[in-house]
Amino acid sequence: MPAQQARVFLAMALCGAAVACACDGARALRRLLGLGDVLSGALDLAMGALAAAAMTVTALCLRIDPLRLYAFAGVAAGFALYRVSLGALIRRADACARRLRARLKKG
């Protein structure tokens, strides 16, 4: 049983990291297109639906009968790991690009 729990935890962590990456992509798309509040809210709802669908598909593929707390913990761990690793690099590069664009507009 612990081996299956570890497998589910790791699969859900990958799912959480993928959803976090998609959230970064949606943020970049929102900024690039200059979406208003209503469209940004719709995009946020779509991202939430994507996250729910990703967890559901992962749970079905792994045949988790009742969704256990460690599955949610895996998603949270994957999301957090992405945010402090690759996500932090992406956000830093995005901030540098925004500063550069602002300087180019001024000068």
Image (spheres, rainbow, N blue to C red):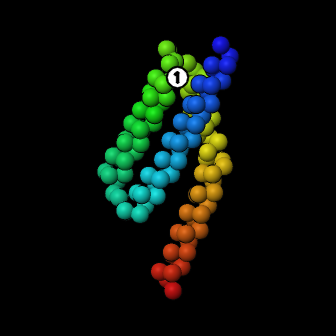
Front residue of 90 and 38: 90
Q: Amino acid at mark 1?
A: Leu
Coordinates of residue 11 in the picture (x, y in percent)? 58, 31
Within the image, what quadrant is residue 13 found in?
top right
Q: Position of residue 38 (x, y in %)?
A: 31, 51
- Looking at the image, the residue that sits furthest to the front is 61
Callout 1 secondary element: helix
Quarter location, residue 93: bottom right
Give the vertical position of 105 relative to 25 (above or below): below
Task: Identify the residue at image location x=53%, y=69%.
Answer: 98
Question: Which residue appears at 59% of the width and 68% of the height?
Answer: 96
Identified at 37% across, 63% down, the residue is 34
Front residue of 12/92: it is: 12
Q: Residue at x 41, y 38 (%)?
A: 50
Q: Is residue 76 visible?
A: no
Residue 14 to residue 106: above or below: above
User: x, y percentage for residue 56?
Assistant: 44, 27
Q: Which residue is mark 1?
A: 62
Categorize mark 1 by other alpha carbons within 10 Å: few (<14), some (14-19), many (20+): some
